[in-house]
Amino acid sequence: GEMVLRDGKIVMRDGEGTRTIDAASHPAVQALIGGFLYVLQGDADALSRTYELAFSQQGAVWQLTLVPRDAKVLKLIRRLSLEGAGIALSKMVLIDGNGDISTSTFERVVVDRHFTSAERARYFALPAAP
């Protein structure tokens, strides 16, 4: 399957069909997207304001764990862990407020793709809060 963030919505496609989630109307989704985008944007200040951070590295392999600082968000997302090697993300593990674990793996990651200003605004900007 695949997951695409576009125009403030998450579009997920798999063998069962396509589902769309409006991120602006779901605080947990907004927080998840925010954490992910802050990492992609390299915005360490926004990450540290929004999450408690733990980083570990062995050689080129690294792990970044994000724990929400906001108590309301923490009830929805307990922890988000990102793993990778070098500059490529390979795995994302989300533990939600109920303790359920969702794992996403990333393959064939293209790390040298350059986006135009319009593409960056469209694909990597946080949707407005309701």
Image (cartoon, rainbow, N blue to C red):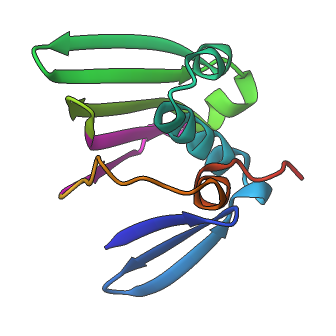
In the image, taking residue 22 as reference, residue 39 lies left or right, namely left
Which residue occupies 40% across, 22% down?
A: 65
Q: Nearer the viewer, residue 77 or 125?
A: 125
Would you say the magenta stretch is mainly helix, strand or loop?
strand
Give the answer, above or below, for where 68 lies relative to 120.
above
> Image quadrant for the N terminus?
bottom left
Q: Nearer the viewer, residue 119 or 45?
A: 119
Which residue occupies 37% across, 87% down?
A: 16
Q: Is residue 103 magenta?
A: yes
Looking at the image, how many numbered discs can be counted on the residues?
0
Where residue 93 appears, x then y in whole percent?
34, 40
View extreme (left): residue: 59
Q: Nearer the viewer, residue 74 or 48?
A: 48
Where residue 18 appears, x then y in whole percent?
48, 84
In the image, taking residue 11 as reference, residue 80 lies left or right, namely left
Where residue 70 appears, x then y in whole percent?
72, 22
Q: Is residue 99 magenta?
A: yes
Give the answer, above or below, for where 79 lies relative to 20.
above
Which residues are the magenta region?
A: 89-107
